[in-house]
C-alpha cells in the first residue's frame, strides 16, 4: 500500500513518548524478587515464576548473535498458579549504549494471533537511534501463538476463513458450531485461558524476570488492546506506552468487527469521489455515482460468472471481501478495481495475496476474541444483524455482522476488562484506517484519560509507525 511519508513525524512522536525526561526516570533495575507484587498471597504464589532465570541463547542460525531468546514458564490459569504451566517464548536485543539505558521496551504486532518474537529486529530497523540507545528491545510470542505453547484446534484450510457472507448463513452456523466443538475437544483445557488479560499478566511476569520496576511498550492494532489492559491491571508498572492504530476497549470484540461496515462505506464514498476526479487515469467514471456503478457492475458480473483472481474464482461476495480494506487507500483501490473489471471481462487478476496465518494463529485468535467477552448465543441474532447491516452497508455489512464460533464457545472464565485509567500513553492513528478506524482510536483516547493522541490527517492504511 502507498502511504504518505509519515515516519519523520512519528519518529519525533515516538522519541517524545519514550525519551527520558518527560516523566520521572525509572529507578535502576533490581532483583526479580524485589520487584514482585507487594507482599500478598498472590505475590507469594507467583514467586516461582517471577524468580525465573532465563537461559538466553541465540535465537537462530540466521539471526544476529546479539539477538537472544529464552522460554518462560507461566501459569495457564493465574487463579491457580500451582496448576498447569505453559511456555512463553521471549527475545531480547540489548541497548546499543548501556550507559544511556532507561529500561525495557516490550512490543506486540497485533492480531490477535500475531507472533512477536522477532519484532525487536524489526524495531531495530525502524526506531530512532536515540530510542534504541535507551531500551533493551523485548519481543514475545503471546500465549497460544508461535513458539509459545500453541493452541491447535486441528482446523482445515477451509475452516480458517473467519468472516463469511450472509448468503451462506446456515452453512456458516454449522461451520461456527463445528469449529467451537473442535477447539473444545482438542484444546478445551487451554483455550479458556488464552485471553488478553492473561497475556498482560504474562507481560508482568516477564517484567519481573527481567528485573524491572516498570516496562515501556509499543503495540499495534490488537497490541493496543493488550497495552490498554496492561495499564488497567498494572497501572504503576506502565512507563511509556505507544499505541499505534487503536481499538475501542468497549467494543472488544464483536462490535470491533461490526464497525468495519459503516467505516467501509465512508471509505468507499471517499474513494469514488477521488477516482472520479482521476477518470483520465482509471476510466471508471467521471462522477462518484459512475465510479460506484463500475464497482457494483463487477460484483454483479462475478455473481453470474466468477472472476478469476490469482487462480481462484470469486463470486460477488468474494470480490467485496477481497477489496474492502483497500478502499481506505484510494490509489491502490482504483488500481485493483481496474484489474477486477478487466478480469470480469475475461482476463485474470493477480493481486499477490498476503500469506494466510498459520493454523495455530487462527485458533489462538479465536480463543482471544471468544474468551475476552461474551457473545450472543442465539444464531438468530446474527441473522437479523446481518440482514439489517447488509441493507444499510452493502459493501461489508453481512460479513461484519456474521456468526462466528464465539456464539458456541464456552463462557469466558473472567469478566470483561473495563479500561478506565489515567496512565500516560501516546496514541497514533491514521485518519483512514481499514481495521481500527479513527473513531475507535478516539474512544481509546477517552478511556485512557492520561493519553495524548496524534492523528495523521488524510493518513491511509492500517498502522502508522514504520510502514514506509
Image (cartoon, rainbow, N blue to C red):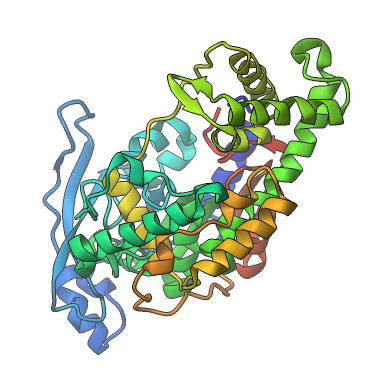
Foreground: 35 or 387?
387
Which quadrant, please, contains the N terminus?
top right
Residue with the most extreme right position:
287
Q: Quadrant of the C terminus?
A: top right
Outermost residue on the front side: it is 304
Residue 43 in the image: state x and y as whole percent: 25, 81
Q: Position of residue 164 (x, y in %)?
A: 50, 47
Residue at the spot 46% in from the left edge and 33% down from the top edge? 126
Can residue 409 be seen by looking at this rendering?
A: yes
Compared with 141, 412 (above or below) is below
Residue at 41% x, 37% y is: 123
The quadrant holding residue 6 is top right
Residue 242 in the image: state x and y as whole percent. 53, 52
- Image height of 31 relative to 395, above or below: below
Residue sitting at x 68%, y 44%? 264
Q: Is residue 174 left or right of residue 401?
A: left
Closest to the observer, 304 or 186: 304
Amino acid at each position: 500500500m502507498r502511504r504518505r511519508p509519515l515516519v519523520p513525524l512519528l519518529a519525533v512522536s515516538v522519541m517524545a513518548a519514550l525519551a527520558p525526561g518527560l516523566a520521572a526516570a525509572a529507578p535502576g533495575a533490581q532483583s526479580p524478587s524485589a520487584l514482585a507484587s507487594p507482599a500478598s498471597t498472590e505475590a507469594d504464589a507467583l514467586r516461582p515464576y517471577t524468580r525465573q532465570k532465563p537461559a538466553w541463547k541465540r535465537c537462530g542460525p540466521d539471526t544476529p548473535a546479539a539477538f537472544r531468546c529464552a522460554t518462560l514458564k507461566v501459569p495457564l490459569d493465574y487463579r491457580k498458579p500451582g496448576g498447569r504451566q505453559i511456555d512463553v517464548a521471549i527475545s531480547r536485543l540489548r541497548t546499543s549504549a548501556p550507559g544511556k539505558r532507561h529500561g525495557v521496551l516490550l512490543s506486540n504486532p497485533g492480531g490477535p494471533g500475531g507472533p512477536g518474537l522477532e519484532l525487536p529486529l524489526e524495531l531495530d530497523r525502524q526506531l530512532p537511534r536515540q530510542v534504541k540507545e535507551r531500551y533493551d528491545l523485548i519481543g514475545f510470542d503471546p500465549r497460544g501463538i508461535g513458539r509459545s505453547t500453541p493452541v491447535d484446534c486441528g482446523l482445515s484450510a477451509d475452516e480458517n476463513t473467519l468472516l463469511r457472507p450472509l448468503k451462506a448463513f446456515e452453512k456458516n452456523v454449522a461451520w461456527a458450531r463445528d469449529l467451537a466443538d473442535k477447539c473444545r475437544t482438542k484444546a478445551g483445557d487451554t483455550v479458556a485461558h488464552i485471553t488478553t488479560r492473561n497475556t498482560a499478566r504474562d507481560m508482568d511476569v516477564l517484567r519481573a524476570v527481567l528485573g524491572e520496576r516498570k516496562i515501556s511498550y509499543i503495540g499495534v492494532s490488537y497490541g493496543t488492546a493488550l497495552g490498554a489492559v496492561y495499564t488497567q491491571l498494572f497501572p504503576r508498572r506502565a512507563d511509556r506506552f505507544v499505541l499505534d492504530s487503536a481499538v475501542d476497549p468497549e467494543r472488544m470484540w464483536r462490535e470491533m468487527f461490526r464497525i468495519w461496515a459503516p467505516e467501509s462505506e465512508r471509505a468507499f464514498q471517499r474513494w469514488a469521489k477521488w477516482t472520479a476526479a482521476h477518470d483520465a487515469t482509471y476510466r471508471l467514471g467521471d462522477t462518484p455515482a459512475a465510479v460506484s456503478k463500475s464497482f457494483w457492475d463487477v460484483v454483479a458480473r462475478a455473481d453470474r460468472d466468477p472472476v478469476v483472481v490469482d487462480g481462484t474464482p470469486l463470486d460477488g461476495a468474494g470480490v467485496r471481501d477481497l477489496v474492502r480494506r483497500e478502499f481506505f487507500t484510494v490509489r491502490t483501490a482504483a488500481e485493483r478495481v481496474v484489474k477486477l473489471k478487466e478480469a470480469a471481462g475475461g482476463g485474470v487478476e493477480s493481486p499477490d495475496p498476503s500469506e494466510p496465518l498459520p493454523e495455530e494463529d487462527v485458533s489462538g485468535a479465536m480463543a482471544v476474541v471468544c474468551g475476552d467477552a461474551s457473545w450472543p448465543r442465539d444464531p438468530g441474532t446474527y441473522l437479523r444483524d446481518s440482514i439489517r447491516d447488509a441493507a444499510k452497508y452493502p459493501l461489508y455489512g453481512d460479513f461484519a455482522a456474521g456468526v462466528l464460533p464465539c456464539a458456541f464457545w464456552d463462557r469466558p472464565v473472567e469478566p470483561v476488562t473495563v479500561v478506565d485509567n489515567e496512565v500516560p500513553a501516546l496514541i497514533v492513528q491514521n485518519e483512514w484506517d481499514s481495521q481500527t478506524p479513527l473513531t475507535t482510536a478516539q474512544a481509546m483516547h477517552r478511556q485512557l484519560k492520561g493519553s495524548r493522541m496524534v492523528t495523521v490527517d488524510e493518513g491511509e492504511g492500517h498502522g502508522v509507525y514504520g510502514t514506509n
